Image (tube, helix red, strand yellow):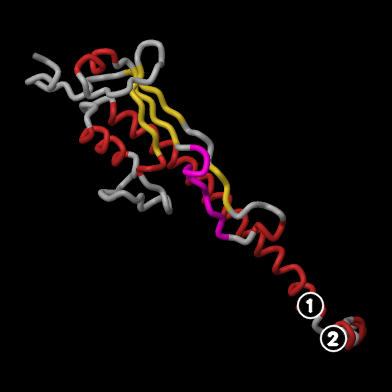
Amino acid sequence: MSRLWKNSTPKKACRPKTQKGVAAVEFALIAPLLFAMILGIIDFGRMMFTMNLLQESTHRVAETATLVFPDNNGINKALQAGLIGSSENNSPLISNFTTAHIELHYLDVNGTKIGSPETCTDYDRIRFVSAQLVQGDDGYAFEFVTPINLLGFPQTMDMPAFSVVLPRESLGWAENGTPCSS
């Protein structure tokens, strides 16, 4: 019985010589598409992360602008707050993102932009603060790392106009008042 058992099992699986290396060839054909898809997913994740940071940046600008006096110093301080984690004009988290990519406006009760909010008559009219990304040629465009333009997609993508409107808060009011309090 043990002899029968030994003869019934195959010793080696025989492959024809023409099949050698087929797996390597198949992998070589599929690997570029697989890697391109993985890199595309990573790039899409980068784009979503950037969009989230841009929304947060506009929110921080508007929030800071509600707390500072609306003169040049206060406006610059508010715009700097949008460059998350930076003390210069460029954001360390978003490549090529500067204070020039954010618009800051002070609005009256009707939502009309106030021309020079640092003057005392206009200061009293401020009811809302608006911050949004600049659109058009001067707007922020996300740059893809992967060469998706080979598939017919653009290499850059303009970001949407993230906009935040917040009600005024202290606008620089302190215990000693503001430059407009007399």
Q: Foreground: 34 or 64?
A: 64
> Residue at the spot x=61%, y=53% of the render?
41
Image quadrant assignment for residue 155: bottom right
Q: Position of residue 26 (x, y in %)?
A: 79, 73
Is 69 placed left or right of 24 in the picture? left
Q: Which residue is mark 1?
A: 25
Q: Residue at x 41, y 48 (%)?
A: 97
Q: Is residue 26 magenta?
A: no
Image side of residue 157 versus residue 91, left or right: right
Chain part drawn in magenta: 135-145
Q: Callout 2 environment at 10 Å: few (<14), some (14 to 19), or many (20+)?
A: few
Please name the amino acid that badge 1 sits on: Val
Quadrant position of the N terminus in the picture: bottom right
Q: Position of residue 67 (x, y in %)?
A: 24, 26
Q: Position of residue 125 (x, y in %)?
A: 28, 13
Label 1: which secondary element: helix
Amino acid at dot 2: Lys
The tag earlier along the polypeptide, 1 or 2, is 2
Whether 8 is drawn above or below 136: the answer is below
The residue singled out by tag 2 in the image is: 12
Measured as percent of width and height from the top left, residue 166 is found at: 36, 22
Please tell me in which quadrant of the rendered image residue 73 appears.
Answer: top left
Q: Nearer the viewer, mark 1 or mark 2?
A: 1
